Structure formats: C-alpha cells, structure tokens
Image (cartoon, coloured by chain):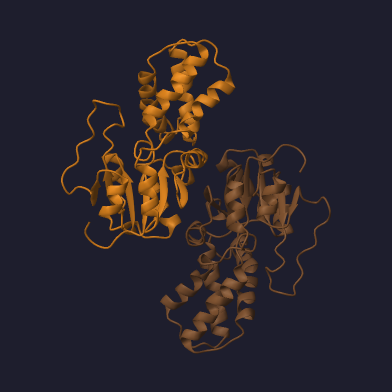
Chain colours: A brown, B orange
Amino acid sequence: MSGDRPKALAFDVFGTVVDWRSSIIRELAEFGAERGVERDWARFADDWRAGYPAAMDRVRSGELPWSTIDVLHRLILDDLLAAADLGDVPDAERDHLNRAWHRLDPWPDSVPGLTLLKTSFVITTLSNGNVSLLTNMAKRARLPWDCVISAELFRHYKPDPEAYLGCAALLDVAPSELMLVAAHPSDLRAARDAGLRTGYVARPLERGPGTRPPRVADGEFDVVAQDFVDLARRLGVATP
Amino acid sequence: MSGDRPKALAFDVFGTVVDWRSSIIRELAEFGAERGVERDWARFADDWRAGYPAAMDRVRSGELPWSTIDVLHRLILDDLLAAADLGDVPDAERDHLNRAWHRLDPWPDSVPGLTLLKTSFVITTLSNGNVSLLTNMAKRARLPWDCVISAELFRHYKPDPEAYLGCAALLDVAPSELMLVAAHPSDLRAARDAGLRTGYVARPLERGPGTRPPRVADGEFDVVAQDFVDLARRLGVATP
C-alpha cells in the first residue's frame, strides 16, 4: 500500500471476521431439532440478517429509541418465529436463540491472521454489534482483540461517520492512521469518506455457496487481501 | 463469598493491576538521565499522582470541559516541570513522558491471576484511564482483558455511580452480577453503593515501601484476597 503504515486496524465483524450464516443456520437447526420441527433454516437465517438494515433505519428515523443489535435481532426474530408458525416459544428459549449472534464461528484464517496483525498494530472491532455481544463472541472464539469498540459507544451505527471518527478518537489516532478492514464495500466507502484507510478482504462464502462477492474496482481501496494472513503480509508483518 | 458467583469482574487499574509508582519513577529517571538532571523523582511521581483527584474535580465542577486522563496528566505534568525548573522541555518530549502512564508494569501476580480468572469470568478494566491508555498498557503488559471499559465511555469518572452502572450495562449484566476488584476502599464503597459486588486486593507497595495500606473492616467487602491468584482461588477457579 502507498504511504506510511496505519497505526491501528478496526475490523468489521459480521461476515468479515465471523461466518454468521453457517453459525446461525447451525443454531437454528439445533433449535428446530430440540422442538422437533423442520423449516428452511438457511432461508430463516438469511431473512434474520436481511431484517437488520431496516431495523437500524427505524432507530435512525426516531421510530425506535437507541437500541442495541441484541434488541434489534430480537424484534426481527419474534416476527420470523410468528411467521414460521412455530407455536409458543418461551422467552428464555427465544433469548438463547437470539444470542446465537454471540456464538458465531470465525473464518479459518481469522484467529491466525489477527494474531499476526496484533504484533504490529492495535487491533479492534468496529461493529454494529453491541459490546457484550462482541465480548462474548471474542471470548468463545478466542479473537485476540486489543480492545472492543462498538457503534453502541457512539449511539451511531455504521455507516454513520460518527462510528468511524469515534473509533479513531477512542484510539487517539488520526482518521488517516486508522484502517477499516471489511468484506463490504459500502462499509469501506463510508470509512474512506470519513478519512480512514481501507482494507478489503473478500469473503465469497458469506452469503453461502454459489453467491457472488461484491465487485470492487481496481485501486478503490488501499489494500485488497485474500484473507487476514494475506492482509498481514501485505501490511508488512513477517508471516510464517 | 456468599451467594452466586458474579458473571463478570471489572478491575480498577492504577495501583490494583499495575504498579504505577515504580513505573513512573523509572520513566522519570530515564527522562532525567537523558537531560542530565537529577531530581527527587519519587517525590515528582507522588506529586503527579496526587494532582489527579483535584484535576478530576475541575472537570466535575465544570471549570474544565470533559477531559481524558491523558489531558489531565499533561496539565499536572506541565505544572510540575515548571516548578522543577527543568528548562525548556519540547512538546514531543513532554508527550512521551506523559505517556509513561501507558507503559506501567503489572504487579507480578496480575497476568497469571487474570489469565486464571478469564477462564471463569468476563474480565474488563473499569478505570478512569482513557481507552487508548488502557489499550496501549494492556498490549505492552500482555494483560488479557476480554474488553476495555473506561470512565471515558460514560464521561463520568469513578467514583460517580454512572461509571459502575455504565460498565454493567455495556456488559449486559445486572449490577449485582458484576464485581469491582480494587485496592482502594473508596472505589469499592462507591461500587457497592451502586449495587455491585466488591473484591478487595491489598497492594501494600502501591505508595512505596514503608507505607501502610488502607484499613478495611471485616466483612465490609464480599471478598478480600492477597493477590489476583488468591482472588481466583477464592472465587472458585481451579488454580495450579
């Protein structure tokens, strides 16, 4: 990449660090097996995820008060459970299922790559997931963050500029000293517009086999990497 | 301790996790050696620390705007450097010296004890130190926090109740499910008043050899431990 290296790397999490789709399908299948019901759990997982931008917009518009992603996930889940005709699901069971988003598995390169990157950079989350979700996820998946930064701390979800600039401020670095790493061009473009550097890592399996990753123009982002170990190499970290 | 175990432990940092006094004296002595001056650096360190409650009160009273501890440490440092008649100290040098508070060494039991406690509890900082200070400190000293929570996130320094309650809220636990661990009874009493559990760990060397640790009445706190490994044992963690 051109210019000096960044001082810190902030990572988008859902899809970039963890494979939300496989993990949520697995949890839904377990839920179904316990209740003795079968549904199209892949479709249910995709619908759950698809409901989340609209739920954030209900907060942005003022229709809902500031809400954590746990709360938004639960609103969407309650609607999906009702639509799936699954009968009475007790609150404790819904809560456990909702916290499936705390139990997402990392992509195979995430922990080795982050461990390498941590030797040269401050590494943090920068996710719309709430602090407790990100903390529980990191503990279970052994993600070696230096700190856990969430949109919750700014009461602004990404892609609002307050989230990117707030992250740089908490780390006490200039926006240009911070690189957002994400698998989603829209997130990276908003970070770039806020003055951050950008690192794109393709996650072609995020939406399941047979789907296409988003298109990225040559030179649109500062670094394009195949995975987190490749990102470390491209950022000049000595890799095995 | 009585009752169920807490879900999460929040640690005071300066004095409880790290030996600020020895570390600051060491950094001041290095600063003096580079400039070829000798002063009573232990006294300088104690004065630097002693200026900090008054500086926080200037923020609480509205005389100063919300300020990170880095900013408050720098205000105090500038006054102490002027009083010590050290001549012109360039800004970059002052800034490096001020960041000595990011480079504090842990007590010998801190990393082994936290590593044990992390197997059974969510462990976080709850310090008046700012996020970047705590993050840099943890990275250097290899403190294995699950997340980094600071008074900065609430714009309320301890012992304001907002700091303790804000920490519980971010972790998504009830105040009674969170234990503050600290070497300072005043911090613990404020946490208890906010509904948290309390763990006292004596740090008799915090203010140097020959000083007395504060008095603690029997039964005043939920757990009293000799160090972090002893705390793990008393909280039921299997220890080596």
Camera-nearest residue between A50 and B20: B20
Q: Residue at x 50, y 24 (%)?
A: B97
Viewport quadrant of the N terminus of chain A: top right
Q: Whole-percent x and y of residue A113?
A: 62, 53
Whether residue A156 appears in this view of the structure is no
Q: Whole-percent x and y of residue B47?
A: 37, 22
Camera-nearest residue between B193 and B91: B91
Q: Whole-percent x and y of residue A88?
A: 46, 86
| The quarter of the displayed image where residue B41 is located | top left
Extreme residue toward the front, this view: A240
- Name the side, left or right, on which B30 lies relative to B194: right
Q: Residue at x 69, y 71 (%)?
A: A207
Camera-nearest residue between B226 and A62: B226
Extreme residue toward the left, this view: B218
Q: Residue at x 29, y 40 (%)?
A: B183
Q: Residue at x 61, y 76 (%)?
A: A45
- Name the side, left or right, on which A71 lies relative to B120: right
